[in-house]
Image: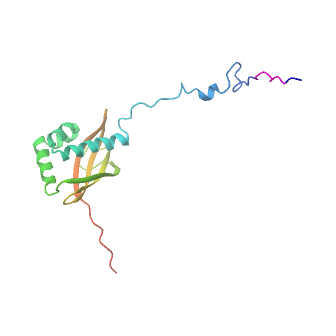
Amino acid sequence: MSSVPAPARKIPVAGIPGAKPFASLLSISNAPRLGPQPNSLDNAVSCATHWVRMSDGRRADAMWLEAGAMMQKLVSRPEWVRYLRKIRVDRGLLVGREWFEVTRVRDPVGLPAGDYLNVIFVAHYTRAVLFETVSLAPGGTGWLPVGYVIRPVQREIPFVQ
């Protein structure tokens, strides 16, 4: 007796006559597609990184021009240039910078009500270790910088009993 394989049996998919096996499992053509996410956290960190690098290059004018209109209304261009010069004094050369934290800020004092993000970096300079905070507001095409603050990293004081 010769052994002849039995013809392949078609198994209907989910009770649909004539459907090919597994076809519905592989079809995702009707699934929603994600497009660009201009206000994503990744874009916030990228925007903030770009801004601190402009500060490193002493490009205060370019920073002001790329800032959101909200910041430009609150701080004039000459004031911004003076502010950047003042906060860059005595830091020395940049040794390294690392992204530290992203925090959500709701209704900050001095700005219109709304949700903002602060992207915080720890920057190591030859004469100081500093927190650099870039404040961002959501815009139609992505995050817009609206502030830049530098403050020293406070060293922990050992607890003495």
- Name the magenta segment's main secondary structure: loop
Numbered-mark total: 0
Quadrant (top left, top right, bottom left, bottom right) of the C terminus: bottom left
Query: What residue is shown at x 31% (from left), y 48% (from top)?
Result: 119
Q: Is residue 4 left or right of residue 58?
A: right
Residue 48 location, x and y as percent?
A: 28, 44
Residue placed most toward the observer, 115 or 53: 53
Query: What residue is shown at x 31% (from left), y 73% (from top)?
Result: 158
- Residue 7 part of the magenta-drawn span: yes
Residue 20 location, x and y as percent?
A: 67, 22
Q: Is residue 30 left or right of residue 154?
A: right
Judged from this view, the residue extending furthest toward the top is 18
Residue 63 location, x and y as percent?
A: 19, 41
Q: Is residue 76 left or right of residue 32?
A: left
Q: Which residues are magenta?
A: 3-8
Quarter of the view holding residue 67:
top left
Query: What residue is shown at x 32% (from left), y 78% (from top)?
Result: 160
Above or below 29: residue 67: below
- Residue 68 part of the magenta-drawn span: no
Quarter of the view holding residue 23:
top right
Q: Is residue 15 left or right of residue 121?
A: right
Residue 46 location, x and y as percent?
A: 31, 41
Residue placed most toward the observer, 8 or 16: 8
Residue placed most toward the observer, 97 or 137: 97
Name the image colouring. rainbow
Query: What residue is shown at x 27% (from left), y 46% (from top)?
Result: 135
Judged from this view, the residue extending furthest toward the front is 2
